[in-house]
Each structure stands twice: as structure tokens, then as C-alpha cells.
Amino acid sequence: MNYIKNFGLSNILLLILCLAIILIAEYLFLKGDQLHGIFIGLWAPTLLGVMIYVKLINNGRK
């Protein structure tokens, strides 16, 4: 539980969301719908980038 406090519940939820997005993109890509798989697969790095940006903004305010 200490890990969740240090890392933050919102960060853990966003990482789980990114993992789900990657799994869905892999499923679509391997199923044969490659363009949709690539499109959805690009959401994960976008969310991670937003997460990093928000952390940088919050660290600058401290």
C-alpha cells in the first residue's frame, strides 16, 4: 500500500489504462484491422506524455 501512496492512485490508473489500450491495439492489429490497431496504439504514448507533462508542471510549482 505504501507503493500506491508514493506513486499515486491516479498514476496507477493511467498506467492500467495505457496497458489496456496497448492490449486492445494488439488485438485489433493481429485480428487484421491494422489501421485501427495503429490508431488506437498511438493513444498510449500520448497519455504517458500528458502524464509526464502534468508531473513536470506540478514539480515546478513546489
Image: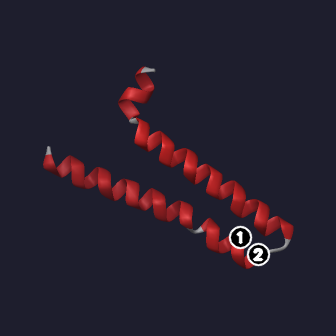
Q: Nearer the viewer, residue 8 or 52?
A: 8
Disc assigned to residue 49:
none
Task: Identify which residue is drawn at 61% across, 50% down.
Answer: 19
In the rendered image, residue 7, in percent from the top left (x then y), is placed at 40, 34
Q: Quadrant of the N terminus?
A: top left
Local packing at callout 1 (Cα closer than 10 Å; few below 14, some 14-19, many 20+) is many
**Secondary structure state at the residue bearing disc 2:** helix
Q: Which of the 4 image quarters holds residue 44? A: bottom right
Q: Quadrant of the C terminus?
A: top left
Residue 34 place in picture, x, y as percent: 76, 75
Residue type beneath disc 1:
Gly
Alpha carbon of mark 1 to alpha carbon of mark 2: how far?
A: 5 Å
- Quarter of the image for residue 8 reads top left
Q: The disc labelled 2 sits on which kind of residue?
A: Gln
Q: Residue tagged by mark 2?
A: 34
Question: Residue 14: percent from the left, percent from the top?
Answer: 49, 48
Position above or below: 28 against 18: below
Q: Secondary structure at mark 1?
A: helix
Q: Residue at x 32, y 58 (%)?
A: 53
**Quarter of the view holding residue 52:** bottom left
* Residue 61: x %, y % from top left: 14, 49
- In this view, the residue farthest toward the bottom is 35
Residue placed under numbered mark 1 in the picture? 37
Colour style of the rendered protein structure: secondary structure
Verify CB contact (< 8 Å) between mark 1 and mark 2: yes
